Amino acid sequence: DTEVTQTPKHLVMGMTNKKSLKCEQHMGHRAMYWYKQKAKKPPELMFVYSYEKLSINESVPSRFSPECPNSSLLNLHLHALQPEDSALYLCASSQIGLRGGKPDYQETQYFGPGTRLLVL
Amino acid sequence: RKEVEQDPGPFNVPEGATVAFNCTYSNSASQSFFWYRQDCRKEPKLLMSVYSSGNEDGRFTAQLNRASQYISLLIRDSKLSDSATYLCVVKVGFQKLVFGTGTRLLVSP
């Protein structure tokens, strides 16, 4: 089962709201990712978690706050967003390959269906 | 210069045609390369990884030229269901994927 699930599918929020996006995978993957995709643009990496620890933050504004409660779940907390933050938010996961017992490479990333966010 | 560059298209081809997409990347240290497919309003899905020796999966053939920092995808006998955006993807460092802007393919009857 190569499924990554995301909720909600659609979200409309005002600039003063607080909301959360959720992502779940049960493939035993130890790396999880948040991407942002604007219309007619490619996905852009926001955050990476490896073994439930934040390993990459691509200089994302603090109004986006990621959280990885356990190895299967990834959340993205949203607060005081701007209309330009409206986009498709994609979650992905991948296994981490070990070589000599140490994390060495990242295998194929599997994407969830995304949450389409509109900020008014 | 963008890290990964692709011709955005669209490429309009009839069913049964052969079509090729190209992609160039700027980071010579990149080690892993992929083609993803993205249908309208859907998530990207891995089409195939790209290996130095070139690889084929059915009607799809991918090639990598490290010296020229160039990746290609060839689709033979195009089907209507091949209509999608094809994303060239390069892994930079341990975990970061960088996506090209995508090439849109429209296959018509």
Image (spheres, coloured by chain):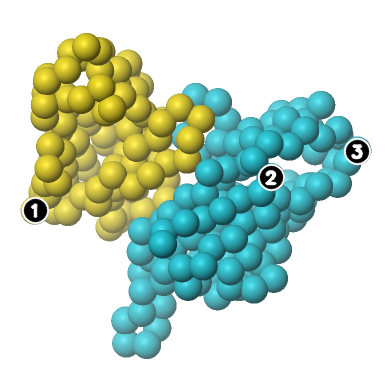
* Residue B35, x across and y down, in percent: 29, 42
| B91 versus A84 height, above or below | below
Q: Quadrant of the C terminus of chain B?
A: top left
Residue type highlighted by circle 1: Ser
To which quarter of the image does residue B19 belong?
top left
Disc 1 chain ID: B
Mark yes or no: residue B12 visible: yes
Q: Colour of chain B?
A: yellow
To which quarter of the image does residue B21 belong?
top left
Picture disc at residue B97: none
Spatial CA span between label 2 and label 3: 19 Å
Disc 2 chain ID: A
Question: What residue is drawn where x is 41% and y is 77%?
Answer: A103
Q: Which residue is mark 2?
A: A8
Spatial CA span between label 1 and label 2: 42 Å
Q: Colour of chain A?
A: cyan
Question: What residue is drawn where x is 21% and y is 50%?
Answer: B50
Q: Which residue is mark 3?
A: A16
Picture disc at residue B53: 1
Secondary structure at numbered mark 3: loop
Q: Nearer the viewer, mark 1 or mark 2?
A: 2
* Residue A32, x across and y down, in percent: 54, 62
Mark yes or no: residue B96 visible: no
Q: Is residue B42 left or right of residue B74?
A: right
Secondary structure at numbered mark 1: loop
The outermost residue toward the right is A16
Residue type highlighted by circle 3: Thr
* Residue B23, x across and y down, in percent: 26, 34
Secondary structure at numbered mark 2: loop
- Characterize the local packing of mark 3: few (<14), some (14-19) or many (20 or more) Cα atoms within 10 angstroms: few
Does the residue at mark 1 contact the one at mark 2 (Cβ under 8 Å)? no
